[in-house]
Image (spheres, rainbow, N blue to C red):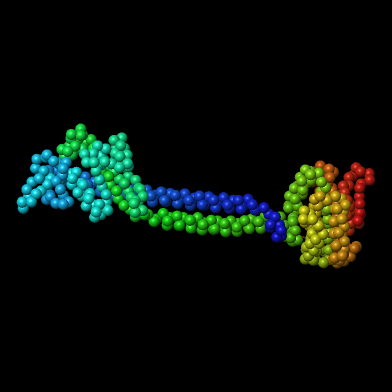
Amino acid sequence: MLSLLRAVNNGLIRRRIGLVVMVWCVVVMASLSWNLHQTYHMRKEIAFESARALYSQVLSTRLWNATHGPVYVPVSDEVQPNPYLQGLPHREIEGPEGNTLTMVNPAYMTRQISELARTHHGVIFTITSLNPLRPENVPNAWQADALRQFEAGVSEVGFFVEGEAGERQFNYMAPLFADAPCLVCHGHQGYQEGDIRGGLAVSLSFSRDGRWFGLVASHLAIALLGSLIIIALGGMLSRSYRLLSVSAKVDPLTNIPNRGFFNEQLALEWARNQREKTHLGLIMLDIDYFKSFNDTLGHQAGDNCLIHVANLIQAQLERPADFCARYGGEEFVILLPNTDALGAWHIAKKIHQALFMENLQHPASVFGRVTLSAGIVVERGTFDTAEAMLYAADIALYQAKSEGRNRSILGPITSSSSAPPISQV
Ligand SMILES: Nc1nc2c(ncn2[C@@H]2O[C@H](COP(=O)(O)OP(=O)(O)OP(=O)(O)O)[C@@H](O)[C@H]2O)c(=O)[nH]1
């Protein structure tokens, strides 16, 4: 039974389990990449919203300045008169306390606030242009690229980069359009109201996102756990399948292969034999006077006798390829690959002798003990089909019975042959 268990080919089940594990892992990995993508997308959305808010804030401040006409603040170390407003009337005026106030236009105010934001809040925003008045407003590479994109119709640009301190930095830029107050200084550059005259670049720092680690770890755990469950359930399924396959092939009383399994084996060996043109021996055996055995000693004793004889027959087989099955009732069959008539005869003789030595009492038999009759055939180009071979063995067995039982007959026996090749133990 154990050897049969091993013999059942469950490679297909293993391959299927492997496939299910693979599909499971692919699904988990797809979920991971979707979640990572979503996390990145969300983070980028938040970064865009924050940058847009800052951009709007700066524009509102500039608008406030532009709307209220010249704004004046006291001249100090931080706020010196703006050289780009040189020549404008009233660039400096006297304050109520006799101090000097200087004009702060939207661009100058943006620079002032930008400086405060950079030093106090770590937020960087700068005004930049492809055609700047101030040399400090010359764009860097990404800003120049963004400015060119605005001219091509793009409304904003934003992306993450690695910050200097290893943090994530989000660079954002949206266009600045020329309006009346701007043209005071930039009019001579040929700008009209509504033209894109530059952009407001914003750089925000974000801490590194540790969520990806949690996502990767949890997905790996799910993939591993799921795979283990699939493998465990698959193993149980595979074992049940093997047990089912085996029980479908084994005779429940004697625990040796049944007739169905024998038929499969016969088809295999027949095909191999036809290919390789070797000998294939077949012995059909039947317990003598078994009805009387049951009648005198009872069915339970009959069952025990069948088990005993099955084990005894199996014990006489010499090669791993030799195959014995319960063919039905008190009938057994043996397949002997690569075995000629002499070999098959030798096995039949061994069985007769072993059973004789076993001396299983059979009071109703003329022999006083359990005996067998056997029909032997050997295929080597003799039969057209496996069924014909089996039939010939059955005829030889019948002949052994009719000649007095407790013997073997070597077939084939044909009704047409005047002198059938009958041998006898
Ligand atoms: N105890 C038991 N008896 C069985 C089993 N299978 C078949 N038999 C019996 O085996 C007997 C076979 O009887 P027959 O076919 O007349 O053959 P026989 O009495 O052995 O006579 P010969 O074969 O001519 O020697 C029947 O009585 C069946 O009931 C089984 O599994 N257990």
Q: Is residue 110 visible?
A: yes
Q: The C terminus lies in which quarter of the figure?
A: bottom right
Residue at position x 29%, y 50% from top? 50
Q: Is residue 295 left or right of residue 27?
A: right
Q: Evaluate whether residue 388 shows in this view.
A: no
For this view, does 156 lie left or right of residue 270?
A: left
Q: Is residue 111 left or right of residue 322?
A: left
x and y, in percent, of residue 215 in the image: 43, 55
**Position above or below: 68 against 207:** above
Q: Among all residues in the image, which is located at the extreme top? A: 190
Q: Position of residue 187 (x, y in %)?
A: 18, 35
Q: Residue at x 45, y 51 (%)?
A: 32
- In depth, the one of 204 and 54 nearer the eye is 204
The residue lying toward the viewer, choosing from 191 and 419, is 191
Which residue is drawn at the image coordinates 87% and 61% (left, top)? 353
- Camera-side residue of 107 and 303: 107
Picture layout, residue 247 above or below residue 201: below
* Residue 403 image-quadrant placement: bottom right
Quadrant of the rendered image containing residue 65:
top left
Quadrant housing the N terminus: bottom right
Q: Is residue 50 above or below residue 188?
A: below
Residue 79 image offset from top left, x and y in percent: 16, 49
Residue 399: image x %, image y %?
Answer: 89, 52
